[in-house]
Amino acid sequence: LDLYLGPERRTVTEADLRQMVPLSRAAVVFEIGKAIQKGDAVRAIDLIDQQLEADESAIGIMRASVIPTIRNLFMAKLIVEKLKVPTGGYPAFSGGLNRLSEADRAWLPQKKDGSGVNVFPIFLAVQSAANFELEGLQRVLEATLKADQALVTTGLDHRLVLHRLMAEISAARKAPRRRRSRRSPTRPAPARPSARSGSGGPSGISSGNTASTRHASERSHAGVQADDAMSDHPVRTR
């Protein structure tokens, strides 16, 4: 890794690790499921393409990674919303599932030894399932079934079928909520009195008073002119 970075760059990124450390088949199966849960279609498609280029079967990718991931998301969402099983921690979740009636537990995946419900994979999907609506996961489950049938029974391009399914899964994921910035409430600016209003002008004088003041000013000005004229032509008294 040190030789790969060279002397000019000392910061190691996730992309560097992906480039230098190849994933095993089991790790790729896990990473595809993780990308699906996050709604990261780009990452999921990239991993699928790597596996197809390595001559992995598209049907194998579908049934080893995609179908189990979607099934666990759907089960986790249904259990939380419909059966109201607590999700505060693994013990509470496991105990809640095992306390369900036999009819409610019949459709859940069982352990290989038959000792009860295989709780852990469903519990791991609970947090990611919260980012989906139940109706959206049901549509994704149906789309996954159709994609699996298309891989088996049709001559469609396997790469295209898987890419389209990844896009549908990503579209079904709810958009993350944006945090509202806490801003101090702005005080409205004081209203400026209008000169046209009848209640008052900029100096607080009403329009009626303004008109009378203007007339008084005109009369005063006329009086000054008359006084000037009389001073120029004095009146002679007999």
Image (cartoon, rainbow, N blue to C red):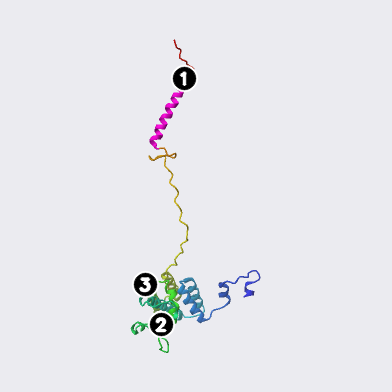
From the viewer's side, name the closer residue of 4 and 223.
223
x%, y% of residue 65?
Answer: 45, 79
Q: CA distance from mark 3 to mark 2?
A: 27 Å
Q: What is the three-letter code of the residue carrying label 2?
A: Gly
Q: Nearer the viewer, mark 1 or mark 3?
A: 1
Residue, disc 3? 135
Residue, disc 1? 229
Q: Is residue 112 above or below residue 190?
A: below
The 10 Å Cα crowd at callout 1, few under 14, some 14 to 19, many 20 or more, is: few
Whether residue 62 can be seen here: no
Q: Are marks 3 and 2 in contact (CB under 8 Å)?
A: no
Q: What is the three-letter code of the residue carrying label 1?
A: Ala
Residue farthest to the bottom, as pictured? 113
Q: What is the three-letter code of the residue carrying label 3?
A: Glu
Q: CA distance from mark 1 to mark 2?
A: 112 Å
Tell me, for residue 95, which label it has, or none: 2
The 10 Å Cα crowd at callout 3, few under 14, some 14 to 19, many 20 or more, is: few
Q: Are marks 1 and 3 in contact (CB under 8 Å)?
A: no
Per the picture, the main secondary structure of the magenta-coloured stretch is: helix
x%, y% of residue 189?
Answer: 45, 49
